[in-house]
Amino acid sequence: MKELPHGLMQERPLQISSLLTHAAAFSPQRQVVSKTPSGIERYGYREAEERARRWAIGLSRLGVRAGDRVASLAWNTHRHFELFYAVPGIGAILHTLNPRLWEEQLVYILNHAEDRVLCFDPDLIDLVERLAPQISSVEHFVVLASRDAMPESASLTLNCAEDLLADADFSWPTFDERVAAILCYTSGTTGMPKGVLCSHRSTVLHALYAQSAVAFGLTPMESVLLVVPMFHAYGWSLPYVCAIAGAKLVLPGAAPDAQTIVDLIHQEGVSLATGVPTVWTGVFDNLDQTNRNLGPLKRALIGGSAMPPAMSRRLREQYGVEPVTGWGMTELSPLGSFTCATPEVNAMNGEARDAALYGRAGRVLYPLEVKVVLADGTRAPADGATSGDIWVRGPCVASGYYRGEGGDMLDADGWFPTGDVGVLDEFGAIAITDRVKDLIKSGGEWISSADIEKAALDCPGVAQAAAISARHEKWQERPLLLVVASRNVKPTREGIMAAMQAKLAKWQLPDDIVFIEALPLTATGKIDKKVLRNRFGDHLMNNKGGEEVLREDARQ
Amino acid sequence: MKELPHGLMQERPLQISSLLTHAAAFSPQRQVVSKTPSGIERYGYREAEERARRWAIGLSRLGVRAGDRVASLAWNTHRHFELFYAVPGIGAILHTLNPRLWEEQLVYILNHAEDRVLCFDPDLIDLVERLAPQISSVEHFVVLASRDAMPESASLTLNCAEDLLADADFSWPTFDERVAAILCYTSGTTGMPKGVLCSHRSTVLHALYAQSAVAFGLTPMESVLLVVPMFHAYGWSLPYVCAIAGAKLVLPGAAPDAQTIVDLIHQEGVSLATGVPTVWTGVFDNLDQTNRNLGPLKRALIGGSAMPPAMSRRLREQYGVEPVTGWGMTELSPLGSFTCATPEVNAMNGEARDAALYGRAGRVLYPLEVKVVLADGTRAPADGATSGDIWVRGPCVASGYYRGEGGDMLDADGWFPTGDVGVLDEFGAIAITDRVKDLIKSGGEWISSADIEKAALDCPGVAQAAAISARHEKWQERPLLLVVASRNVKPTREGIMAAMQAKLAKWQLPDDIVFIEALPLTATGKIDKKVLRNRFGDHLMNNKGGEEVLREDARQ
């Protein structure tokens, strides 16, 4: 179609600064609370917006121009929150860095992004001093601290954030909503991390749909504890969603322990807390030790990986807290789905309802388009059982990685292959059954590592489990199970195998089980299967225990 | 700023068709329920989307091209719902018409919009036959009925909607999100109605923010009864919001009476019902007569004008239903604010809380910018007391009327003067105190007609009240109060005056009170003050009862 008549509506761009000016104007009392080494700091959204404007001037005086990259190497604090608005607010690009990455990766990323300014928390001074000689583009180092908390440095000239904050006589500029706003690198299976570059448009649209009642659905009555790091997929966009909603935002500072999390929940009236499963495991231990409960908490968002059923049950039954989860990735801005009941699901009996509601990664969120594609290119039926590759498309989905790394990431129709394998059910929910790269291809048949892990975790004495693909003479690949035993009950190889036989077909059973002390984790807290494959990939080449069973069953 | 780097996100336009394809894919079981003369019709969103696609082909075969206007003169039914998607879906413009307008206005609007197709409900055949000879652009008349419910017409060739519906082998086209989508004329104080032309972008953005938990906040667990007509400000956008949320949508057909409304609430598990205050008055009468309650209803949305306190109280105390309200206008797509509690408001004592929560028009919704401007051009403080002119700006606000009617509607900075007068409070809520045109300017002082009406409605025996500006020899304008007495208690002029003296300053009291049988209503159910001013505007020129009191007080 050619030139169609346009609507007669205002051409106002969707800009990140407008989220905070809205909160400042209409939710001035609602607070941003920040735990720092010197104690709790708190202010209302009006002061937050004023400080963001003072940052904007300060950064400009430092020489930051629209289009420049400003890196942050920081935990969840109010100063980091201010950068989420100040940097994109002047048309520059906030580049959030994960302090837990390998230093080699941090050096690569800083050089690749050509960051001109590096803002960092004072406790990371040693890391920054080690990085500095290897990074060429950074001209200014800004410490996110008050003057009396500034660290010493023999090698670097440090700017104190509070000295940078100038007067607030400044108005947020207006520009095209497609202008770049935030850069966040994401680790792939192979090679160095790749950068996802969000625009103002995608960030604001995402905040709007994440604030839908079928997702975060926040109101001014809520208090949100952001345990998930703000450098991890934009802190699941909550620094923006809370501003739209006028919800209180509680930032727990550097690497909060379980005690801090439970204290903040009680002290700040937290109604929604977010974290990966290991965070919640730590919280449970703390509650057991202290005989406390979760007080005002209403919802626990468990993200980053699948929600363990026992964790979901305990939250509901012992603490009266509703567990919610979602699926997403940096490339999706990041949310793709969110737990939400439907009348059909609620009408099911107990266990079936739990599986349909808590056993999935949530319902797909508009405006994300999602399709599950089978090996033959057709779409999988929405039956909750047939798994396929998950493809997505939408205005908040990346179109390519920074500086073209990885080549074209979309197909001809604009779909992005997420690398996740999953199912879609008839109620609009998806479940992630595996990563494409974690599937095990045994003699032409696919075996899901997630299925094996789920069966293993139900065995008494299994604290953690990881299934990987190990090379095999006859079947090319066969599953190998790595288990971390619990402290109390010591499981045996035979006991676990016997228990798993009730849940898996014989050909899906792992060929062997290896007990290890701890599972290696990635910088974002997920099990690092790359490390496991490197270490145990040849384990079955010297060990053929499972072969007889296999041969028998593979004929089916 | 010049050429800034763009984010690397997909260029997917926000299109209305995507709302329905989302619901079809992920909420296929959730229903659209429609009351027609022959009974209840119901289908899931998948079938709704399929029928919209069949409409799209049917309209194309009828000759409708992108950019063409297709008018609807219809009540709330599933076929009207389908047009909300099918017409914009092919790049054409849906023009919703209010069947209750004066015929002269309908003729003007149809000719002004140059509609090529007119789709109408079968009960409106007589009206359409009268209009037809006066409208030149309409080539096709489509009746929104099944074949067996088709009316007869001696003068017109009628198409049956169900005959138009072709096969569904069609994909929604992709085009610029700024393309025009819906045209809705709005009545002003003077002259003929003017057209507001929404784009796909503004409609989808509005649906996203209206679905925020601080506004409609729907989930698939909800069932929404749309009593507000779909021709009135896009049915408050609920035909779109329900699709995003996967909520059930219940359409009550032509002019639903209170009995129908209460029946549908019970039969369809309605959790949210929408209507203007008079709808709820009728519902209360019906409940009194039948001794029923409101069963599954959780929220009652009272829109179109201020929520009467007695109505709000009765909903809460007698029926356990939470009353909510909002403020908006066609030019805002239409929602500008929505009732939402904050911790500060909830902490107030009973009456103060009620006033802050239910006595306002709700909190301002992102991304709408709102400012309240005093006569000297400065902004009114957000103190809940200082009233001024309400100006708005945002991506879902009109930039001008169709075909340039009324000239420039924005100031140099893009702000639109809404014509409403109101206050903003410290909790982000606004209250509309008057329309600019309904203010009474007495000897240089402004008097709010809304304040007088509120005081009058608290007097025993006053069923309805309207204050207007009447010409006055000495003070140019003075307030005149029109009262409809209740059936039971007969009030007197002196009794009302005495009661009002406790609530108003002497100079704010009306000069006279006139009892009338009924107040004239506009086509959208609001009190028609234009008619009252025409009839009673000279009333005080022969009646100077209040003058002595006035002279005394105006010296202050």
Image (cartoon, coloured by chain):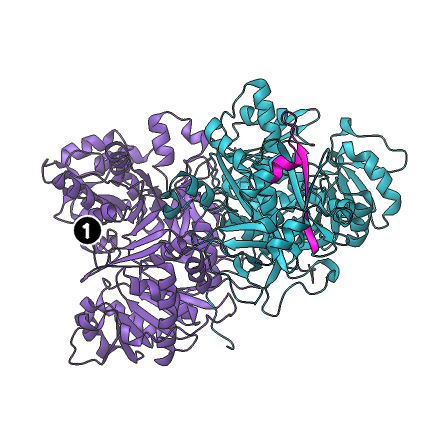
Chain colours: A purple, B cyan
At 87% from the left and 33% from the top, the residue drawn is B153
The residue beneath circle 1 is A260
User: In terms of depth relative to the viewer, which is nearer, B3 or A217?
Assistant: A217
Q: Is residue B104 above or below residue B380?
A: above
Q: Given the image, on which type of amino acid does mark 1 rest?
A: Thr
Instruction: Measuring from the top left, give residue B244's x and y in whole percent.
Output: 52, 44
- Whether residue A278 is in magenta: the answer is no
Tell me the magenta residue range.
B476-497
Instruction: Measuring from the top left, give residue A171's x and y in whole percent.
Output: 46, 71
Q: Is residue B245 above or below residue B175?
A: above
Instruction: Measuring from the top left, give residue A476's x and y in whole percent.
Output: 28, 48
Is residue A19 visible from the viewing direction of this image? yes
Relative side of A339 to B483, left or right: left
Give the quadrant of the C terminus of chain A. Answer: top left
At 47% from the left and 72% from the top, the residue drawn is B5
At 24% from the left and 55% from the top, the residue drawn is A252
Q: Residue furthest top?
A: B290
Q: Is residue A78 above or below residue A379?
A: below
In which image quadrant can residue A108 be found?
bottom left
Relative side of A58 to B549, left or right: left
- Whether residue B477 is in magenta: the answer is yes
Is residue B115 visible from the viewing direction of this image? no
